[in-house]
Structures are given as structure tokens and as C-alpha cells.
Amino acid sequence: MMRVWILPVVLVLCGSAVATVLISGGSPVAGAALLPAFLALAGVNSPLIFPRSTGVREAERRSAVDGRPVVFWRPGCTYCIRLRIRLGRSAGQLHWVNIWRDPAGAAAVRAANEGNETVPTVVVAGRPHTNPDAEWVREQLSPSGRG
């Protein structure tokens, strides 16, 4: 649970340290400019930008009921972040499983990716798709796009 916050916390601490050194060294503009950049990086790499994760069993159950895809992800994954950002508001319609919080989810990803925990892995109608295009994932949300 705590390892999902390591990178964001390190980014906040480093940004604060760099900003403090720059401001105290006579460069307040540079310090003031860098701190928000570090904070933004911390935010993007935190689990906060992702919809609430569920366990793999619950996500599979919900997907069976409503037909929406299941997305396996982990914090800090640049491909997961890119998919999440490109999905925009559509991301909330998907079922998200954080493989660092759910060992069964990590096992499902390894089974789909030849033993590797490659994310994002999107499961649509029981078929896994590794690192798919966001537009394709969005199409899977419509009844005609599933399958």
C-alpha cells in the first residue's frame, strides 16, 4: 500500500528542497517556478488521478454485469498515466484494478502477458489487450464496440 506513494512523496520532497535552495540562494522566481512543476509530477504519479480501484474479482463481476472493460494498472506507470489522461472523463466508466494493491490482479496480468506485469492491460469480453490505444478503449464502452 505504501509503495504507491513513494514516488509522489520523493517528488514533493525533492521539489521542496530544490525550491528552498533556489529561493535562499537568491533565485526566488526559479524556485517558485520549479515547485509547482514537482508538485504536478507528484500528482500525476500518484494514485489520485485514477478512478477508485477495486479488486479483480469485483471488477470482473461488475464487467460481467455491465460489459465495461477492466483496466489493470499500477501507480507510476507512464503508459497507465497516458491512457488515463487520454481517456479523460470516460475513465470513470471503466473498472480499474491496481495490481500493487491486489495480488490476484497482478496474477491475472502475469497470466495475460507471458509472466510479465505489463500494464495497462485492458480486458474486454474476457480477452486481454496490452497497452491499447485510448480511442480503442473508449470505443469499447459503446454497445457496438464490444467484442
Image (cartoon, rainbow, N blue to C red):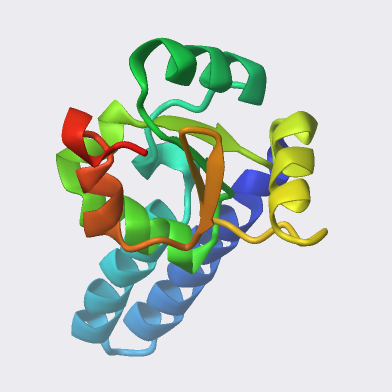
Quarter in which the N terminus is drawn: top right
- Quadrant of the snapshot with the C terminus: top left
Instruction: Decide: is 79 above or below 138.
Output: below
Residue 39 seen anywhere in this rendered image of the structure:
no
Q: Residue at x 28, y 30 (%)?
A: 92
Image position of 68 with respect to 110: above or below: above
User: Where does the image place residue 86, in percent across and percent down from the top left?
Assistant: 23, 58
The picture places residue 85, in percent across and down from the top left corner, at 26, 55
The front one of 145 and 35 is: 145
Total marks shown come to: 0
x 35%, y 57%: residue: 83
Residue 2, above or below 6: above
Judged from this view, the residue extending furthest toward the bottom is 26
State the residue at coordinates (56%, 48%): 128
**Relative horizontal placement of residue 44, taking residue 125 as reference (left or right):** left
Instruction: Let me know if residue 58 appears in the view.
Output: yes
Q: Position of residue 138 (x, y in %)?
A: 22, 46
Give residue 99's quadrant in the image: top right
Compare residues 30 and 5 and report the one nearer the observer: 5
Is residue 143 left or right of 130 when viewed as pictured?
A: left
Indicate the position of residue 58 as horizontal and vertical percent values. Answer: 58, 14
Q: Quadrant of residue 136?
A: bottom left
Q: On the image, which quarter does residue 67 sit in?
A: top left
Query: Residue at 23% of width from left, 41% of height from top?
Result: 145
Query: Would residue 85 appear left or right of 147 to someone viewing this image?
Result: left
Residue 135 in the figure: left or right of residue 39? left
The foreground one among 72 and 145 is 145
Residue 49 vertical placement versus 24 (above, below)? above
